Amino acid sequence: MNYFLHYSGKLPEYHKITINNILSVDKDAKIYFCSDEKIDSKYVTHCYPDQLNNEFIEMVSKINYFKDEKNQLWNTSLLRIYYLFEMAKLFSVDKFVHFDLDVMIYEPFDNIKDNLIESKFNITPMTELDLIFGYSYVSSLENYFEICSDTIEILNNINYFEKKFYNSKKVNEMMLLNFALMKNPNNFHLLTTLPNFNDNEVLLFDPAQYGHHLCGVDKKLFVKNTFEEKQYIGREILEKGYKVKFKNNQPLLFANGKKYKIVNLHVHKKNLHKFKSRTYKCLLK
Amino acid sequence: MFIKVIRQLKRNIKQQIYLFYIRNFKDFIKLTNKPFISINNFKKLSNHVYSKNKKFNLNKLKMNDIIFLEIENLNSFVEHVVNNIEVKINLLIQNSNIVIVEESLNNLLSKNLVIFAQNMNLDIEKYENLHVLPTGFKNRNLIRNAKIKNYLNVSREKVKKNNIFISIDFSKHKNRLDLLKLIFKNEIFVFNRYSEHKTFLNEMSKYKFVACPRGTKIDTVLIWECLYVKSIPVLLKTDFSKNLKHLGIPILEVERWEDILLFSETELNNFYQLESEKFLNNEFSSFLFWDKYIKDNLTN
């Protein structure tokens, strides 16, 4: 499977762990990386953001939604939605997996196929208002194009959405994607993040909470081992008491006597070296 | 910074203690949340609790006794108890995983029993011996989201806004996604991001209507919390919603979620004025209301 990664600014050291982990877990992985800093490796096909200018990016730049924000991260996170589309065009790729650079995976794409829906944009839901790139799979560019267009339309009327959904505060790219979901739910498939005892699915995806619980959160102390009630997963675990463990290099959730494999971990704390998969090999040095 | 760290540490310790309790002791503690309804309260009404893992003494069963059981134990109950008794008994069936339809009741409807069942999509008017058992509030032993003081301190606003409040996990059931489209386009819907239980109840109480789509179950805690704050649940028309209506519970039924938009603001307001009169003499989320309902319908 094609894996698209994106990072803006100076590349953190942990990018190598993310890449090595993908290559170790998924033998069929092809990695495409868009960053300001070049990655020279036979394992990675690299491109610069400058190579990706297109109509969407121009439109977003014109809207300049985060013009008053000092932290450029907000803007680059937003642009990433469109960079992915352009990357797909540049590399002539129609289907790809994408997640944040601090995400570790534990299952090859072939093993999770049955949990995804083709022709829809598969993504992890975090809260009522946020869809997050904990794990996502674009199965058709046509469908993703529609989502990109929807988000532009929303950005053009953003005041309405800020007022209606977020007390007139500035929204981020996660909320923007959620608004696109509201606009056209048929374009999306929300990945399973919690056990549903009526289904036989045993694979779960991590939007962020499992990672927060097992690995901690960057620049926050004593968050490890806790759950956040605002997040769907945190709310459910605080009620049902499920256990989340990282055992033999595999994140697992234990619920009602059953064991569920967690496909990915969002390692917000960036201590990715502690959460390598079982098959981890250091290919990119 | 230091205060923030201390606060976080305190929160962490509190949560660890809570999780330890939830994982290890919750099931052994039977707290009641009277005066409200919850499944533990109904359990306490029964004379016997049936479980396939525990020995059940048929000799102790008397005429008109109430037996509490979980739906997962139903087949075993029919085999070991129903097929071996001649006395008329009452059943309270808890069901936390499936929606009960006729087949789920394993021919019980034709037996000499009175059945009260949770999460049931069956028209009670068609069956003489079938009655509703509400999901009610979360069991008190869940502590965090079942604090009685959360309910007692909620404002239960009398002057409400003419909107439909929505606060649900959209990933729980695919039908919930149909609602998303409506929220996006229409001013009538007020969308809420859940933060914590008390805030959620207070927020919900500000609105006349609350959208209560089904989750994994057809009956949800949200319906009973909504009724408690004197807001009207909006439900898709099913036998379940028909049953609630039949019991005099104020609800707004729609065939499809889009149908909400067919109501003008005045119509919605008039509907609320009329239906909310039912709140004057009844507390639909109170144990007293359901205790009376159950007792009125027990075998004689």
Image (tube, coloured by chain):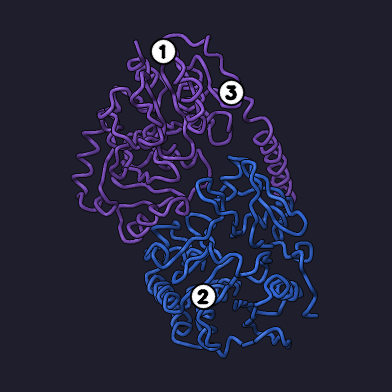
Q: Residues within 10 Å of mark 1 (few under 14, many from 20)?
A: few
Inter-mark Cα distance, 1 to 3: 32 Å
Measured as percent of width and height from the top left, residue A11 is found at 71, 78
Measured as percent of width and height from the top left, residue B169 is found at 47, 50
**B59 or A121: which is nearer to us?**
B59
Q: Please identify, in this view, whether the residue under mark 2 or under mark 1 is nearer the observer.
A: 1
Residue A101 vertical position relative to residue A194 in the rendered view, above or below: below
Q: Is residue B143 left or right of residue B15?
A: left
Q: Residues within 10 Å of mark 2 (few under 14, many from 20)?
A: many
The residue that appears at 22% across and 42% down in the rendered structure is B269
Q: Which chain is purple?
A: B
| Displayed quadrant of residue B279 | top left
Label 3: which residue?
B30
Label 1: which residue?
B86
Measured as percent of width and height from the top left, residue B72 is found at 51, 33
Identity, as a three-letter code, of the amino acid under mark 3: Lys
**B240 or B179: which is nearer to us?**
B240
Q: Please identify, in this view, whether the residue under mark 1 or under mark 3 is nearer the observer.
A: 1
Label 2: which residue?
A81
Residue A134 vertical position relative to residue B87 in the rendered view, above or below: below
The residue that appears at 76% across and 75% down in the rendered structure is A13
Element under disc 2: helix
Q: What is chain A's hue in the picture? A: blue
